[in-house]
Image (cartoon, helix red, strand yellow):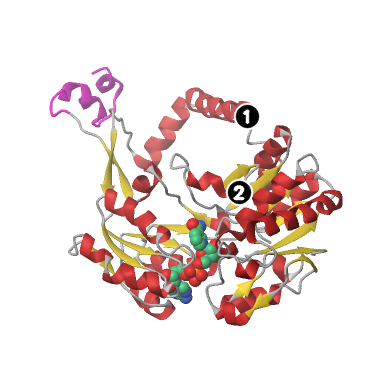
Amino acid sequence: MDPFADTLQRLREAFVSGRTRPAEFRDAQLKGLSRFLRENKQLLQEALAQDLHKATQLDSAFIRKEPFGLVLILSPWNYPLNLSLGPLVGALAAGNCVVLKPSEISKNTEKVLAEVLPRYLDQSCFAVVLGGPQETGRLLEHKFDYIFFTGNPQVGKIVMTAAAKHLTPVTLELGGKNPCYVDDNCDPQTVANRVAFFRCFNAGQTCVAPDYVLCSPEMQAQLVPALQSAITRFYGDDPQSSPNLGRIISQKHFQRLRGLLSCGRVVIGGQSDECDLYIAPTVLVDVQETDPVMQEEIFGPILPIVNVRSLGQAIDFINRREKPLALYAFSNSSQVVKRVLAQTSSGGFCGNDGFMHLTLASLPFGGVGSSGMGNYHGKFSFDTFSHHRACLLRRPGLEKIYAIRYPPHTPRNLRV
Ligand code: NAD
């Protein structure tokens, strides 16, 4: 019998019910804590004295942001320049030395980063190292003071396991399946323009791309022709010849994506060309929750539509799955958008658009749960790459005031 199971289940159910979220609830709990301290002062003093024989007293304090030391940045292939230089800016700004390991898959950018970038930086403090999984595994045996990883969740676990051996802190910027809820109360063409654009951006190889649509069958009937119209407007009748549509990075990913085209029923696109690593912008309907296309991050220009009967059912669907990196809700009703926001969890959220939230330097960018931990962008990058050192400076004098701390703690002593 597990002695913790009941308690943990009770607390998790309470969290899921939303009980801990209203400000009044949190206020009441903190007031309860304060009352606990006030009403049990004597009891607590006795307990602390028996356990530890001590008490502390603090003055005013400040935080000193200091560089961690030697930082490792591991970056992916899908935005190989941005996702190398973005974290690098934060790491250098905070005063760290940096080892950058770009993805071996985006090999041309890797080459430029390795051969040209170091010429622009002080090479005694900065290095680019090269390699794939095997070399990175060897690199990770070394002790770093911080590791910043962007990539998929499976590799994230490898990185975190390696970091744990040295108790090295990590930021993990991972991926997952980003839901896109489309309410019945919306303009289907506007939604289709935005969803199609953000789904097909970089041929769908974007960690925050809308991964699948949740909507009613009635909305689906309006959305499919609207998506077709948007795709034709963006990429023409023959998207393969459009200069505005990217290609799949490798044979391996192409084969994986082609396999997903057999899920559900193709209503838009569905064509592919192996020689050109081309996958057409594709929309799938009649998709089941158990289909392969709903089991993994798609990372390509394929958009499955899953039918739900109500907003509540959509929220349940989202909450049954791993926490996504981004979540999108489209509705003319701000109440609906706010309800999706309030009753779900995700790294970031955008109402009535695609991944615009990540373009704002005023917002932290990062995942939660299996989509990652930690965040960066703008000032948050500087904070991520800084140790927040808690400091207290005390004047050497005033010893009479501080003498109250010293034992023996008799009533007479305490009068000062
Ligand atoms: P990846 O995890 O395969 O590779 C990322 C880095 O890890 C590369 O430098 C690679 O060389 C290294 N690596 C790969 N396998 C390894 C292993 N077994 N051991 C040690 N190191 C290894 O990711 P990817 O395919 O380059 O990028 C796509 C993934 O990244 C997607 O899941 C996407 O969602 C995610 N991503 C997340 C963000 C974000 O900001 N959250 C941004 C872009 C991409």
For badge 1, the amino acid type reads Phe
SS for tag 2? loop
SS for tag 1? helix
Of the numbered discs in the image, which one, if any, rests on residue 401?
none
Tell whether 159 sits left or right of 69. Answer: right
Q: Residue at x 41, y 77 (%)?
A: 132
Observer able to see residue 158: no
Give coordinates of residue 396: x percent, y percent: 13, 29
Q: Residue at x 79, y 56 (%)?
A: 224
Tell whether 108 sits left or right of 269. Answer: left
> Is the CB atom of the residue marked by disc 2 within 8 angstroms of ligand 1's nearest atom?
no
Q: Nearer the viewer, residue 7 or 151?
A: 151
Q: Nearer the viewer, residue 270 or 339?
A: 270
Q: Nearer the viewer, residue 37 or 92?
A: 92
Residue placed under numbered mark 2 in the picture: 354
Give coordinates of residue 11: x percent, y percent: 65, 45
Q: Where the C terminus falls, by quadrant?
A: top left
Residue placed under numbered mark 1 in the picture: 25
Q: Where the N terminus falls, by quadrant?
A: bottom right
Query: In the image, is residue 401 above or below residue 17?
Result: above
- Specify the segment rendered in magenta: 395-416
